[in-house]
Image (cartoon, rainbow, N blue to C red):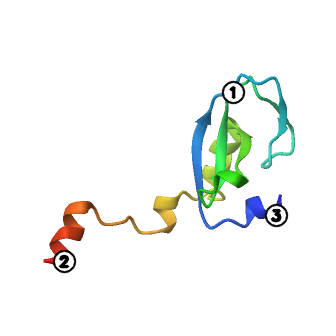
């Protein structure tokens, strides 16, 4: 799980899964049944490195500052209008 914790930023989204599987939460190390409410966390937005995480663990890590989101780390990209005006 070193790759998971070495990311600069994370994307977090709600997980929906109907597959009867059990995952291990990388934040607390406990089991996570796929049919329970949980989240997907993508280190650096990379879907290949996604992990299933307890929702409570995400909230706790966010409050502790250990799970920064992209908007908090990288400046937002300029919108289409701003890019077009810059060219003119």
Residue 49 on image: x %, y %: 72, 54
Among the two numbered marks 3 and 1 on one chain, the one whose residue lies closer to the N terminus: 3
Going from N to C along the chain, the mark reached first, 2 or 3, is: 3
Q: CA distance from mark 3 to mark 1?
A: 25 Å
State which mark lies toward you, 1 or 2. Answer: 2
Residue 25 vs residue 14: left or right? right
How far apart, in angstroms, are the residues tagged by discs 1 and 2?
45 Å
Q: Residues within 10 Å of mark 2 (few under 14, many from 20)?
A: few
Task: Report the residue at 41% width, 69% height from top.
Answer: 75
- Residue topped by disc 3: 2
Mark 2 and mark 3 in contact? Answer it, CB < 8 Å. no
Residue 40 position, x and y percent, is 66, 42
Label 3 CA crowd tier, 10 Å (few <14, some 14–19, many 20+): few
Up-down relation of residue 74 to residue 23 (above or below):
below
Where, quadrant-wise, is the C terminus in this rendering?
A: bottom left
Circle 1 Cα neighbour tier, 10 Å, few/some/many (<14 / 14–19 / ≥20): few
The part of the image, by quadrant, that contains residue 57 is top right
Q: Secondary structure at mark 1?
A: loop
> Which of the labelled discs sits on residue 87, or is there none?
2
The quarter of the picture where the N terminus appears is bottom right
Residue at x-position 78% and y-position 49%: 27
Count of marks placed on residues: 3
Disc 1: which residue: 17
**Gap in Å between the C-alphas at discs 2 and 3?**
42 Å
Instruction: Give the percent coordinates (x, y) of residue 3.
Output: 77, 63
Q: In the structure shown, which secondary structural element does the residue marked by tag 2 occupy?
A: helix
Q: Specify whether 58 is left or right of 30.
A: left
Instruction: Nearest to the eye among marks 3 and 1: give it.
Output: 1
Residue nearest the observer in this picture, 84 or 25: 84
């Amino acid at each position: 799980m070193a790759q998971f914790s070495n990311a600069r930023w994370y994307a977090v989204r709600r997980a929906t899964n109907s597959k009867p599987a059990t995952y291990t939460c990388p934040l607390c190390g406990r089991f996570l049944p796929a049919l329970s409410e949980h989240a997907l966390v993508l280190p650096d937005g990379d879907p290949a490195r996604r992990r299933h995480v307890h929702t409570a663990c995400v909230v706790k890590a966010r409050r502790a500052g250990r799970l920064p989101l992209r908007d908090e780390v990288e400046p937002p990209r300029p919108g289409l209008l701003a890019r077009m005006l810059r060219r003119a």
